[in-house]
Image (cartoon, grey):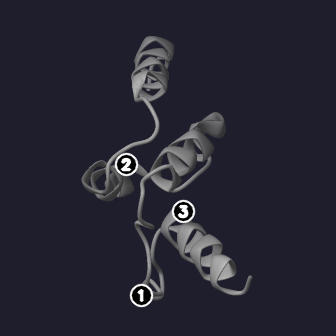
Amino acid sequence: MSDETFEELERLLHAIEAPVTDEEARLLLGSFGEDNCFGMAWTLLHLVESAPSPAVTSQPPEGSNMWIENLWIRYRNTLDD
């Protein structure tokens, strides 16, 4: 990926205003890659979590994207309060 492409993706991600809708959060789940993407994955995670309802409320299948698993763990931790 070129620097220009990366910068454009970063700009577009930061242009999304929180809170997102539940539908937007579900759509954003498909945007997670396999790594941290220089911190952008955390920005995406926080956008997904800004929705009124949790986007991941059941345990993902084994081998799922680590960010989906992270959202599941974070949701599950809210149940322990």
Which residue has dot 1 on it? 61
Identify which amino acid the numbered label 3 is placed on.
Trp
Q: How far apart are marks 3 and 1 (CA)?
A: 13 Å
Q: On the picture, is 40 further left or further right than 1? A: right
Which residue has dot 3 on it? 67
Q: Which of 59 and 35 is in front in this view?
A: 59
Identify which amino acid the numbered label 2 is placed on.
Ser
Q: On the picture, is 49 further left or further right than 16? A: right
Q: Are marks 1 and 2 in contact (CB under 8 Å)?
A: no
Disc marking residue 31: 2
Q: Nearer the viewer, residue 44 or 32?
A: 44
Identify the mark nearer the N-term, 2 or 3. 2
Q: Position of residue 36 (x, y in %)?
A: 62, 47
- Determine whether the residue tagged by mark 3 lies in a helix, strand or loop: helix
Q: Which residue is drawn at 47% across and 68% down?
A: 65
Q: Nearer the viewer, residue 69 or 3?
A: 69
Location of the C terminus (image quadrant) = bottom right
Q: Where is residue 68 in the image (x, y as percent from the top left)?
A: 49, 68
Identify the mark nearer the N-term, 1 or 2. 2
- Determine whether the residue tagged by mark 1 lies in a helix, strand or loop: loop
Q: Which residue is drawn at 50% across and 49% down?
A: 50
In the displayed structure, would residue 13 be above or below residue 32? above
In the displayed structure, would residue 74 be above or below residue 29? below
Q: Where is residue 62 in the image (x, y as percent from the top left)?
A: 47, 88
Identify the mark nearer the N-term, 3 or 1. 1
Identify which amino acid the numbered label 1 is placed on.
Pro
Q: How far apart are marks 2 and 3 (CA)?
A: 10 Å
